[in-house]
Image: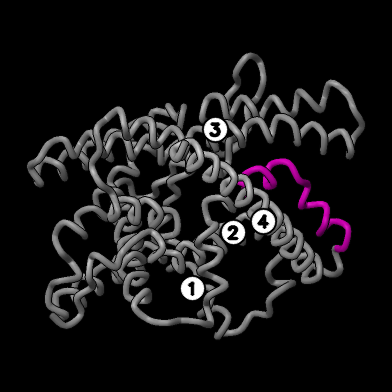
Amino acid sequence: MVGAIKKTKINMGTFDLVKGLAMILIVLDHMIPHYDLTAIVPENSALLLLAFLIRVIGVGINPVFFVIRGYMFREKPAQKMLKKSSSACIKPYIYMMLAVAVLYPAVYSIQYGFGQAAFKQAARWVLAFLFGLHDPVAKQKVIFGIEVRACWVAWFLLTMFLSSNIFNLILKVKNKAAQIALAMLSVVTGYVLSLTGFTYFCLPQGLIAVGYYCAGYMLRKTDFFERKRSVQIGISLFFLAVTVWEAIYGNCSLPYNEYKYGLLEFVGTCCAGSLLLILSLRLGQWELKGLDWMKQIGIYAFWIMCVHGVELICLPWNKIVKAMPEYPLLAFAIEIALKVLIFAVSCTVLKSISQRKYQRMRARKCS
């Protein structure tokens, strides 16, 4: 059939392009608050259009990771899923927490001198990791008499751990309608929890992300890419219309539990994530050699995200723009260059560790 995509050719590597784009936008989004964009980018209609396009794409940036996971999801025995997700999510989460616990007081001491204050400030971040908190400053919590900060990018790992295990349990129910109903119940429960202020262990985010998993899963189970081209285009245009509405009027942040229009925000971001998945699969059919560098970022997106979560907390990036207020563009370029260097070195080291671990596992199996 015209427009069909063979399932046998689809794997996680198929989504490297969209994961690379998402990772770039996430890093830039975390950099922008330090800068006055009007001083860096001149205001004109072409750039405003580009900014709006980025805004439209940005609506689906967080959801698309979960939608992709849902599309590739396979039901497993509960114990096996728990073990696999613990290794994939909880281990990196603990490593990130330990890295922050060591690196933050070290960097703080270099800036302000070694003392008790360095460890007290680090404790604010470590407690956020221990209790899985990712709240904006306005909702700051006090634990053991200490104002807790946030686990920042690490929220993604806890959310993925929770949502994958919950969705795996939902799939034990074999009726498709019941699966969708249970996934939506999970979303509603997560939203209600976010309203109550209970945000420990990223539980609201984990429950809501189950809905994104379900969206991706149902795209595969309903054979979306084997339907008539007109049906695919019609559904994609609907997703696009809802995404544009969300970009113009909505204000949704899964990490921060912010939903301007309640559960309508979930619908908007779910359509945006699904649309990005559809586009990534379509683009995956073409040889886009000019974008190989973006695919490389996508390949290492998970590692980059973990490293980004640590450097974002520990390194004083705001000092760069403060040191050269008259040259914001130069400051912006320097920060990007330093981040790229950190990501490149970190990914090289992590790849080497991963390869050695794999070789040891193979050696044990062969012996």
- Name which residue type carries label 1: Phe
Q: Is residue 22 left or right of residue 273?
A: right
Q: Nearer the viewer, residue 271 or 350?
A: 350
Q: Disc 3 to disc 1, how far (Cα)?
A: 29 Å
Residue tagged by mark 3?
A: 139
The residue positioned 51% from the left and 69% from the top of the image is 295
Q: Disc 4 to disc 1, how far (Cα)?
A: 28 Å
What residue range appears in magenta? 306-324
Q: Is residue 92 left or right of residue 81?
A: right
* Residue 29: numbered disc: 2
Of the residues under marks 2 and 1, which one precedes in the sequence?
Answer: 2
Residue tagged by mark 4?
A: 343
State yes or no: discs 2 and 1 in contact (Cβ < 8 Å): no
Residue 225 x, y percent position in the rendering: 20, 70
Q: Nearer the viewer, mark 3 or mark 2?
A: 2
Is residue 191 visible in this depiction of the protein? no
